[in-house]
Amino acid sequence: MNSSLPTTGRLSAFVERIGLPPTLAIGFLGLLFFMIGDGVESGYIAPYLADNGAGTEARAAIVITVYGLMVTLGSWLSGALSETWGPRRVMWLGLSIWAVFEVLFLSVALTSHSFVLMLIFYGIRGLGYPLFAYGFLVWVLAASPARRLGSAVGWFYFAFTGGLPTLGSLLASRTEPAFGEYTTLWISLFVVIGGGLLALTGLRRVDGGKRLAPESTTTAQSLVASISIAVTNPRVGIGCIIRIINTAPQFGFLVFLPTIFSDDLGFGTAGWLQLVFIVGASNIFANLAFGIISDKIGWHRTLRVFGCLGSAVSSLMLYFLPQAFPHYWIAAVSAAAFGISLAGFTPISVLMSLIAPGQKGNAIAVLNLGAGAATFVGPLIVAIFLDLLGAGGVTIIFAGLYVAAALCVRWLQLPPESQEIVDRGLSLSDLDAETHEIHDHTKPANTEVRPTGLAQAG
């Protein structure tokens, strides 16, 4: 680097060298703080609800289930609305919903110990974080150079998972003993607002935050397209299936592994919780690493080898190795391997945005639906097969799903216009006008074209 380069220039060059888009850097920092605030409650919210209005653990579970359904809905809407509203407005909506309904939840529902109000206010608040976070993801995909999309998405998930639940839980572990659970929830509100305002004010002059779809496209049309695209563009549907497989086993393992590790193997509840932390901590840094790596060796290759096949092997390790060698360090290594391999799925967001460049928001909406579906597909597989095949049999099914996902990667080919974006080193927002013309349905994309370069399937 030229020694005469200004300090700000050297800093920008360093930021770009580590794969962090300089113009979006403040957005990633704001997202991190937003998700820290959102993750503060994750370690104690269920018992707290039971003791402060829900009445029982079962009723608290109902509140959290409604919250989860709203998170899934918000995840879908974040992509669909970004098409016609623009990611910036979607993020503002998410921040506003989170703040307003958290205030109502804290000041009205909890103080009155009303289960109904708790259900309404906490449930609606579930729309907030996915609208903010995944709205920003659409912005990242629109504004980042195509050749660096893997790195950019890696940074997104680094900030996302770094806040929820990792640093959020860490903050709660410090504030809860000092100020109590209720005050800690108020602290989380201010952290969320601070992070949200930091991101949105810091991104106000950055391209990619405005409307993505042509002016002729209405919001209703975008919402319909965000579902129908999975059929009209089968590659988007396949990407959704791969995203479901990504984390369905993770949620499924949470159903039966706690008893196996804590009781059968004798590690105790604390030992199991430490393994969960190891999975999460290893995943955080691996998201960033695989994002950068995928830009160098190919998004398809990273997804297939490290994500799909890596998860197939590590899921088998996670169950069978500690069974054969019941030492805690072996369980810890297996947990770390599983967390790392899950991060190998990072490029799926990149591929989904490039598969449908004229409808990237809608494609991401379908991807987010897959993420939400994984939360019940995994436990459903356990419910159906655990008594029939046992824990080992369910684990083999999960590994088989990962292998099937690896086979599906070959169909995630990019259309010629997306390959051109990659080859020219442009961002998707640079060619939005051209893309809209290409997608006027007068010239359908050639699905037989095999992409080259970074996009090559490997």
Image (spheres, rainbow, N blue to C red):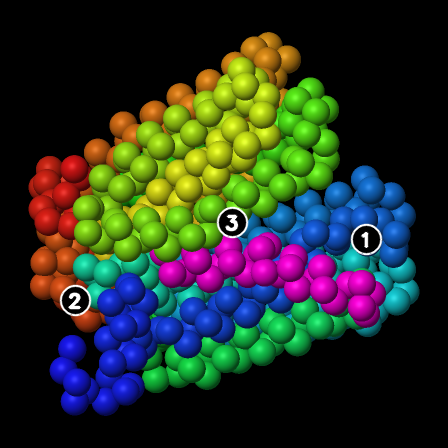
Q: Which mark is residue 90?
A: none
Q: Which residues are magenta?
A: 154-180
Question: How far separated are the C-alphas under marks 3 and 2?
Answer: 33 Å
Q: Is 163 above or below relative to 46?
A: below
| Residue tagged 3 | 281
Task: Give the camera-side residue of 385 and 313.
Answer: 313
Question: How far separated are the C-alphas under marks 1 and 2?
Answer: 48 Å
Residue type, mark 2 in image: Leu
Side of 264 relative to 277 (left or right): right
Point 40% across, 21% down: residue: 400
Residue 218 visible, this orientation: no
| Residue tagged 1 | 49
Element at label 1: helix
Residue type, mark 3 in image: Ala
Asked if the residue under mark 2 is in contact with the one under mark 3, i.e. CB atoms within 8 Å, the reply is no
Side of 240 relative to 232 (left or right): right
Question: How far separated are the C-alphas under marks 1 and 3?
Answer: 27 Å
Task: Give the camera-side residue of 271 and 195.
Answer: 271
Q: Earlier in the sequence, mark 1 or mark 3?
A: 1
Magenta-colored stretch includes residue 144: no
Instruction: Tell me the chief SS of the magenta region.
Output: helix
Task: Give the camera-side residue of 113 and 42.
Answer: 42
Point 55% across, 70% down: residue: 33
Q: Quadrant of the N terminus?
A: bottom left
Residue type, mark 1 in image: Leu
Decide: few, some or many residues near mark 2? Use Cα within 10 Å; few <14, some 14-19, many ≥20.
some
| Residue tagged 2 | 426
Q: Earlier in the sequence, mark 3 or mark 2?
A: 3
Element at label 3: helix
Magenta-colored stretch includes residue 155: yes
Side of 24 relative to 17 (left or right): right
Q: Earlier in the sequence, mark 1 or mark 2?
A: 1
